[in-house]
C-alpha cells in the first residue's frame, strides 16, 4: 500500500506546531524533513510524523 504524504497545513494541525516552529526544528535536526512530491511541492510521509509524535515526551 502506498505511503500517505501530508502537506504542511495537515502537519501543523496534527502536531500543533506552527510553520515557523516546524522549520526551526527541521534546521536543528529535531523534526523530519519533507520529500519532494512534484517540482515545487513537498510533503511529509505520514509514518515519519507518526514516529516523531511517538518519540515526544508525554505531559503528565
Image: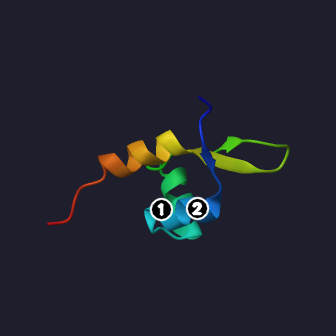
Which residue is at a point 48% across and 51% down the rendered structure image? Answer: 28
Question: Disc 2 and disc 1: Cα gap in Å?
Answer: 6 Å
Residue 39 position within the rendered picture, expressed as x and y whole percent measured from the top left: 85, 44
Residue 16 position within the rendered picture, expressed as x and y whole percent measured from the top left: 45, 68
Is 2 on the left-hand or right-hand side of 30? right
Q: Which mark is residue 10?
A: 2
Is 52 on the left-hand or right-hand side of 27? left
Q: Quadrant of the N terminus?
A: top right
User: Which residue occupies the extreme right position in the image?
Assistant: 39
Residue 57 position within the rendered picture, expressed as x and y whole percent measured from the top left: 24, 55
Which residue is at a point 53% across and 52% down the rendered structure image? Answer: 26
Q: How is the image coloured?
A: rainbow
Which residue is at a point 66% across and 49% down the rendered structure image? Answer: 43
| Depth check, front residue: 2 or 28 | 2
Q: Which mark is residue 14?
A: 1
Tell me if residue 7 comes above or below residue 35 in the rendering. below
Amino acid at each position: 500500500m502506498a505511503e500517505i504524504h501530508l502537506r504542511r497545513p495537515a502537519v501543523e494541525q496534527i502536531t500543533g506546531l506552527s510553520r515557523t516552529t516546524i522549520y526551526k526544528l527541521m534546521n536543528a535536526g529535531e523534526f523530519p524533513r519533507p520529500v519532494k512530491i512534484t517540482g515545487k511541492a513537498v510533503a511529509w510521509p505520514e509514518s515519519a510524523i507518526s514516529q516523531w509524535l511517538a518519540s515526544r515526551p508525554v505531559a503528565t
